[in-house]
Image (cartoon, helix red, strand yellow):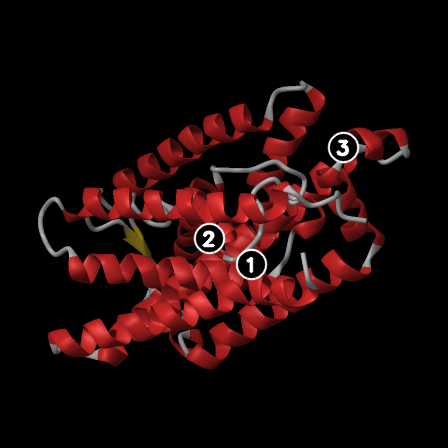
Amino acid sequence: MTRNKKLFIGMLPFLALIVLLAIFCGIVSAKGYRLDMYMKIIFNEGIVLSIVATGAIFIYTLGSFDISLGAATLFSATIGVVTYNATESIVLMIAVIMLTGIGCSLLNSVLASIFHIPVFVTTVAMMSVLSAVASQIITTKGGAVGGISIPSEVVKGLDTSGFKILVLVVWVLVCTFIFNYTKFGRCEKFVGGNPICAQLSGIKYNTYAILGFFLAGIGVGIGAFMTLVYTPSVTTTTAGDIGMNIMVAIVFGGMPISGGARSKIYAAVVGGFSYIVLNNILDLLIESTSGYGITQIISAVFFLVVVYVASVNYRSEMLPR
């Protein structure tokens, strides 16, 4: 593959995001809706998905995945709300949210590493358990519809575009440094690209899996807190689709789902916002009772097409050096 072709392929996710944004703005304007209101929705949803997905990159780089990240985000936010309502301390609330997110993520990796259970089994089990426990807490304390909440004044000063962008940028920069300029990041790519060679080279998979899930847990904690910043309430449907959306977003961002050396941190941000914009475009075009199902079908087809195109580009290439 020539250098120019590689550069063009690398730019495709960014170009796709720009095109999707242009289409979205055109549809909103054509329907006579308020563009600023819809852009705010995309911004808030995109920030949370991008933050959680950025941490998840460390899991997907290993060739693994975690579909319980959405349930972990819901559970962390729920425990955070309960903590604040009991103590009225935002510092303690943030600390509990972060610890809960990290704990949920580490539990997956520890169960898989110690008991040699496939990661997808532990994440499916954790998704069910965390969702059930969070739903029980929410319905018991606030009802399934209304949910539970903290006073809006608590996070009112943080509900600004500047603060949200700052949190996202700092988190992405930290993850980029770890991923590209540390031994941990290089070894993760090696393990994801060829786990057998990595093992023969003395790199222990379990060690890097646990550290990868730890960083993903930090992303879950930050994402749960940012969810409360723009909507200071939690219902049983909060962050419900994040687990699967991350997988789609990472592929949209130009990263192979198999992980390895071609993994990129920016894929989480570019793909995260692209997926949110695409979903909102479909929601605007398909306004009906059965629209949700059709939207999911179209998203799934689009996902398969992107994966196929990406795989075609890599099939004939030599292994990355």
Q: Whole-percent x and y of residue 84?
A: 43, 57
Q: Could you say where residue 174 lies in the image, as x and y percent from the top left?
A: 69, 65
Label 3, secondary structure: give it: helix
Q: Residue at x 47, y 25 (%)?
A: 125
Amino acid type, residue under disc 3 in the picture? Pro
Residue 241 falls left or right of residue 171: left
Give 83 or 87, whichever is nearer the viewer. 83
Instruction: Say which label, 2 or 1, has the lower sequence index.
Output: 2
Residue 124 shows in the view: yes
For mark 2, give the secondary structure.
helix
SS for callout 1: helix
Residue 104 is situated, as x and y percent measured from the top left of the image, at 55, 39
Query: Which tag, 3 or 2, sits closer to the chain's start?
Result: 3
Q: Is residue 91 above or below residue 308?
A: below
Image quarter hosting the N terminus: bottom right
* 21 is higher (above) or lower (below) than 227: below
The residue where tag 1 is placed is: 267
Q: CA distance from mark 3 to mark 2?
A: 24 Å
Label 1 amino acid? Ala
155 or 257: nearer the viewer: 257
Q: Which mark is residue 76?
A: none
Q: Is residue 55 above or below residue 156?
A: above
> Which residue corresponds to mark 3?
195
* Disc with the residue nearer the chain's start (1 vs 3): 3
Are the residues at dot 2 and dot 1 in contact (C-beta closer than 8 Å)? Answer: yes
Report the label total: 3
Q: Residue furthest right?
A: 201
